[in-house]
Amino acid sequence: GDSVTQMEGPVTLSEEAFLTINCTYTATGYPSLFWYVQYPGEGLQLLLKATKADDKGSNKGFEATYRKETTSFHLEKGSVQVSDSAVYFCALAKLSFGAGTTVTVRA
Amino acid sequence: GAVVSQHPSWVICKSGTSVKIECRSLDFQATTMFWYRQFPKQSLMLMATSNEGSKATYEQGVEKDKFLINHASLTLSTLTVTSAHPEDSSFYICSARDNILETQYFGPGTRLLVL
């Protein structure tokens, strides 16, 4: 069945560091792909999405490109801030979620 | 953007009582809503898919008589935890699917503590 494999955390970075969270998927067809973010004490929020191969989703400085050939949707941000500390989830349109990656950014 | 609300945001109850959690889509209609459970520091576990006007579809291992789901309108789904026990204490999250945007929007979650 459909599944998502996400890079395990936790990840601890310094401010302005480069962040990458790997996500690969297994699915029939070409589902839409999503990254959700959960800030401490809050519910999940959609961060970005891509609906077809080679699409790039972007928001708040984060980017992810839908790579059909590698079945990946890695999340990247060039310069993280303390406010980016959160748990990030990769997900398929068919409701398969990755395990979540906790990111902590230190000043 | 789309907003999904949940009520209550937190609830404490005695063992053996039933608790109802509401999930509402505030500015769009959702024929499909989903209920998740999230344990501390873990991912979301899909419990069931709620379809307006029909019976919910439960994931394997989820007791349908324990977790009653009703989706009576296009903007409201309810989850009732019947005869709650301490092991039911968890963070329950609902989401509603915007079919046009093919995107799920999540509620803020309901924290349940059963004493």
Image: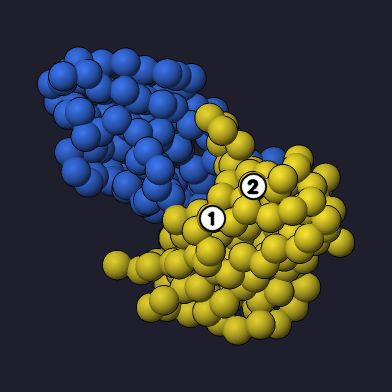
CB atoms at circles 2 and 1 under 8 Å apart?
A: yes
Tell me the distance, in whole angstroms, between the alpha carbons under discs 2 and 1: 8 Å
Task: Give the SS element for disc 1.
Answer: strand
> In terms of image quadrants, where is residue A67?
top left
- What SS does tag 2 mark? strand
> x%, y% of residue B80?
72, 65
- Give me the chain letter of mark 2: B
Q: Quadrant of the N terminus of chain B?
A: bottom left
Q: Check disc 2 and report the residue beneath it.
A: B113
Q: Residue at x 17, y 38 (%)?
A: A61
Q: Which mark is residue A106?
A: none
Image quarter (top left, top right, bottom left or bottom right) of the C terminus of chain B: top right
Residue A87: in sight, yes or no?
Answer: yes
Category of crowding for the residue at label 2, using alpha-carbon neighbours closer than 10 angstroms: few (below 14), some (14–19), many (at least 20)? some
- Judging by colour alone, the chain drawn in blue in this rendered image is A
Left or right: A33, with A82 as reference point: right
Kindly identify which residue carries mark 1. Answer: B10
